[in-house]
Image (cartoon, coloured by chain):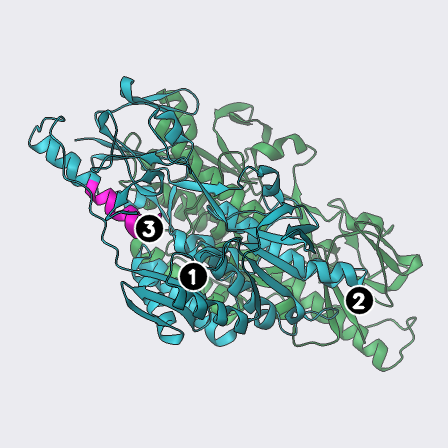
Chain colours: A green, B cyan
């Protein structure tokens, strides 16, 4: 059995901590592990740095950028999701999203530069615009970003500027829906909103965004002068799904069979955020635990087929999603945890979140470095990665 | 007394370890400290992120990019040096140098991609070209880069590729002069060359480079097929020196008076790599210790003048350079140390180098993180920052 892993990036990225790279709490390598190193021990696995542009199930091969092709007996498509601007792609340059390390470094530079521009501003109006931050989207990422921005403004930068008071910065979390953290029980979402306000974040709900440009954001028909907007709202499935020529859901995700195979092609599987599947009458959420469970399931199905020379016509086991719960962190000593009914928030939830994320972070070394960074950040309020790499405009 | 520090970058960079960021041993933030944070305690110091484009001593003001000006009573110009391609600026895209964090991340991506290209190469000729590395310039930086590249090829990447043997990579250190490490005694330079060869580096001396392009490097009139060339050869003084309208040396450095002031303008000082000065009949070298001593000297001169309302006409104390010695690291357990006569090399020299660099690295946290990274790298041969951030061509 020979396995080829094709990825555009040379590393596995621990997405849940990406917001900390974006907010200068961690260095990029702290949350990434080289794929080749992770898989070096498996002699039958080959890692290939490249991008798949098309999958043609009938022809049993995939096409890479540059035209090269790879044949397969079994194919697993796990290209996940990117940002969606709901048809407003023009907003992207003004409201960068957060999916890759490059995104995170861009956001980091934007945020740090905003305070520099405010310090150098020639008018109070311009200064206030640079000290105004908006995070669009009240999901876990938006909440984490907003909470951390507020902490940076109020604590990290204290006493470092001479013409501005960073603590006067306004951080807004703007959610189109009726409440933030829709995936959590309302009681916990309420607690999260309260904790955000305590950290100094203005939480605006039922505030759909209708326009974003370099100088402003418009929500509820009201224009807000803001120079730094971060996008944590929409998720769009990888375009690769569409090349499979099978039914997609509204978000462009592939409607997979119960065993995660693609309708009509039982040797082609989709796992992770790109897969659309209902379980127990509810859609499986686009979260890391679900993706990992899908990966394990597909691996078992394929192994069994090969081992038993099982007829592809025989339906394989259906995927069963185990929901172990849901966590979100808000800021220092502030988080919410929902373990299938067992719900708690505040300091203990925060420690629980910290332990869980350290545990799942790949690589012993990274864990240790991250732990030290966190400990240091906690006692000093400092953030270790407050570095802008290039001259302005070179951040990406 | 009000002090304004103007810098293009928002951070102080610990240059001596930049090669480790370039070779994926350290993350960029590990060797950088935000200027604002370093200086937050000094209420009379203002940090300004910006670039000075011209200094007009007569007018007592400097001009920033964008046209803004800053008036001064005393001015210290410490803009250092960049790479020089000896009139061959066309070589820069093919042979990046190493002065900033952005440079280091670019070099890191180049080196990591080279092995990826080799793995995917369609012909053995192309594969060998991607596995061929050349470092131009046999000074400390070139030696460190070449030694580390050899270690990456031979140890770090072991067992991670399926179509190539990274250990078969050829790393060449190409020096135009008769020997490497010209700043060191010949006996130590010989030892260093021997240690480099043991690490697997081909050391070529008396090999002036006459051409570099995307596919090759020509030295001694002989063309070498190599896809990755790193530049560690020439240093050119910051162009700001020329705007001072005072005598420069051949490298474009400012010929300063004994007190480090500029001829004809005793309120303008030049410190660091941009200053050209002889002491005890030998030019003061462009190294960090000399730059720090110059900075201290200028600060004392200015303080004394202000305190004593001393007449600028009275000549101030002359700068005295204290040469505490010279270190260079070559690779694992390999380094050379020259403490004004006390010379040693090998393992002990390496430990000495390590301790000295940790000691001078800014910030407790960074020291701890760097130490852990080094310890981990030492036992595991792994390098923590083997991350390529963007898609190809986006590295800069």
Q: Chain of mark 2?
A: A
Task: Give the number of the mark in front: 3 or 1.
Answer: 3
Q: Judge by depth and name the residue closer to the eye, A264 or B243.
A: B243
Residue B121, compared with residue B381, is above or below; it is above
Q: CA distance from mark 1 to mark 2?
A: 35 Å
Q: Are marks 3 and 2 on the same chain?
A: no
For the residues bearing labels 3 and 1, Cβ distance under 8 angstroms: no
- Coordinates of residue A229 in the picture (x, y in percent): 52, 35
User: Which span is picked out in magenta?
Assistant: B284-297
Disc 1 packing (10 Å; few <14; some 14–19; many ≥20): many
Identified at 42% across, 43% down, the residue is A149
In which quadrant is the N terminus of chain A drawn? Answer: bottom right
Q: Secondary structure at mark 3?
A: helix
Q: CA distance from mark 3 to mark 1?
A: 47 Å
Identified at 62% across, 73% down, the residue is B158
Q: Is residue B76 left or right of residue B17?
A: left
- Residue bearing the label numbered 1: A349
Q: CA distance from mark 3 to mark 2?
A: 63 Å
Disc 3 packing (10 Å; few <14; some 14–19; many ≥20): some
Q: Are marks 3 and 1 on the same chain?
A: no
Q: Judge by depth and name the residue closer to the eye, A354 or B55.
A: B55
Disc 2 packing (10 Å; few <14; some 14–19; many ≥20): many
Q: Secondary structure at mark 2?
A: loop
Q: Judge by depth and name the residue closer to the eye, B225 or A80.
A: B225
Task: Give the number of the mark in front: 3 or 2.
Answer: 3
**Most common SS among magenta residues:** helix
- Residue bearing the label numbered 2: A259
């Amino acid at each position: 059995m020979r396995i080829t892993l094709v990825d555009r990036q040379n590393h596995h990225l621990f997405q849940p901590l990406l917001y900390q790279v974006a907010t200068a709490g961690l260095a990029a390598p702290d949350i990434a592990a080289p794929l080749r190193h992770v898989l070096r021990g498996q002699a039958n696995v080959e890692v290939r740095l490249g991008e798949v542009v098309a999958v043609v199930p009938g022809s049993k091969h995939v096409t890479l950028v540059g035209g090269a092709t790879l044949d397969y007996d079994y194919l697993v498509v796990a290209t996940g999701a990117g940002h969606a601007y709901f048809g407003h792609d023009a907003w992207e340059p003004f409201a960068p999203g957060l999916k890759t390390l490059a995104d995170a470094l861009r956001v980091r530079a934007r945020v740090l530069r905003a305070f520099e521009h405010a310090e150098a501003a020639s008018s109070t109006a311009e200064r206030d615009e640079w000290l105004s931050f908006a995070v669009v989207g009240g999901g876990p990422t938006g909440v984490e970003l907003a909470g951390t921005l507020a902490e940076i403004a109020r604590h990290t930068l204290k006493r470092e500027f001479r013409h501005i008071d960073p603590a006067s910065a306004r951080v807004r979390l703007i959610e189109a829906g009726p409440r933030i953290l829709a995936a959590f029980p309302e009681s916990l979402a309420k607690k999260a909103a309260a904790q955000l306000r305590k950290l100094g974040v203005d939480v605006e709900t039922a505030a759909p965004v209708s326009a974003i440009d370099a100088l402003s954001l418009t929500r509820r028909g009201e224009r807000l002068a803001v120079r730094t907007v971060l996008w944590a709202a929409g998720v769009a499935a990888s375009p690769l799904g569409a090349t499979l020529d099978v039914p997609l859901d509204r978000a462009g995700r592939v409607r997979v069979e119960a065993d995660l195979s693609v309708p009509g092609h039982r040797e082609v599987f989709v796992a992770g955020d790109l897969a659309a599947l209902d379980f127990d009458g509810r859609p499986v959420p686009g979260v890391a635990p679900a993706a990992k469970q899908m990966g394990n399931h597909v691996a078992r199905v394929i192994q069994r087929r090969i081992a038993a020379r099982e007829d592809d016509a025989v339906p394989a086991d259906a995927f069963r999603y185990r929901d172990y719960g849901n966590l979100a962190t808000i800021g220092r000593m502030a988080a919410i945890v929902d373990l299938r009914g067992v719900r708690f928030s505040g300091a203990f939830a925060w420690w629980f979140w910290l332990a869980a994320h350290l545990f799942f972070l790949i690589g012993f070394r990274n864990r240790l470095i991250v732990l030290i960074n966190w400990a240091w950040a906690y006692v000093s309020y400092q953030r270790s990665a407050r570095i802008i790499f290039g001259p302005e405009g070179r951040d990406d």
